[in-house]
Amino acid sequence: HTTVNSYEIDQISSYFRARYTENGEYSYRYHHLRLERSGNPQEVTAMLLGGADHREALIGCLAILYRYRNNLFHGEKWEHEIQGQQENFERATSLLRWLMDQHT
């Protein structure tokens, strides 16, 4: 098992915490992710509410990216189309590019 330590993971984890939590609890946006459809991985909870190491944080971030994909292509369509989602997809793309660079 490989040790994961990265500025990129810290950055996107911080972004997700700011977006999906308020005062140590889930924000209204969190519930729109519909993580229960992905089994609501414990790594997401650890990443968002604290206590995740870099490996768990990466898994939590990837679970959220997976929900972005499902919500966009397969799930209920967003009430406002994809308005307001640009930063989410830019950050998702950045993380995926970083991951590919780590394994090439």
Image (cartoon, rainbow, N blue to C red):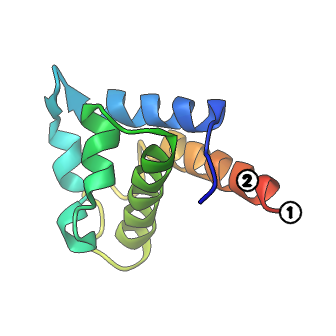
Query: Toward which corner of the image does residue 22 lie, by quadrant?
Result: top left
State the residue position of label 1. 104
Element type at mark 2: helix
Nearer the observer, 83 or 8: 8
3 horizontally vs 56: left or right: right
Residue 76 appears in the picture as rendered: no
Question: What residue is drawn where x is 43% and y is 66%?
Answer: 66
The answer to whether residue 67 is above or below residue 2 is below
Q: Position of residue 50 (x, y in %)?
A: 29, 31
Q: Residues within 10 Å of mark 1 (few under 14, many from 20)?
A: few
In front of the other: label 1 or label 2? 1
Query: Toward which corner of the image does residue 39 lie, by quadrant?
Result: bottom left
Q: Position of residue 4 (x, y in %)?
A: 61, 45
Q: Tell me the CA gap for discs 1 and 2.
A: 11 Å
Asked whether the residues under the numbered discs 1 and 2 touch, taking CB atoms below 8 Å apart as contact, a structural biologist would say: no
Question: What residue is drawn where x is 39% and y is 37%?
Answer: 16
Question: What residue is drawn where x is 29% and y is 42%?
Answer: 46
The answer to whether residue 89 is above or below residue 104 is above
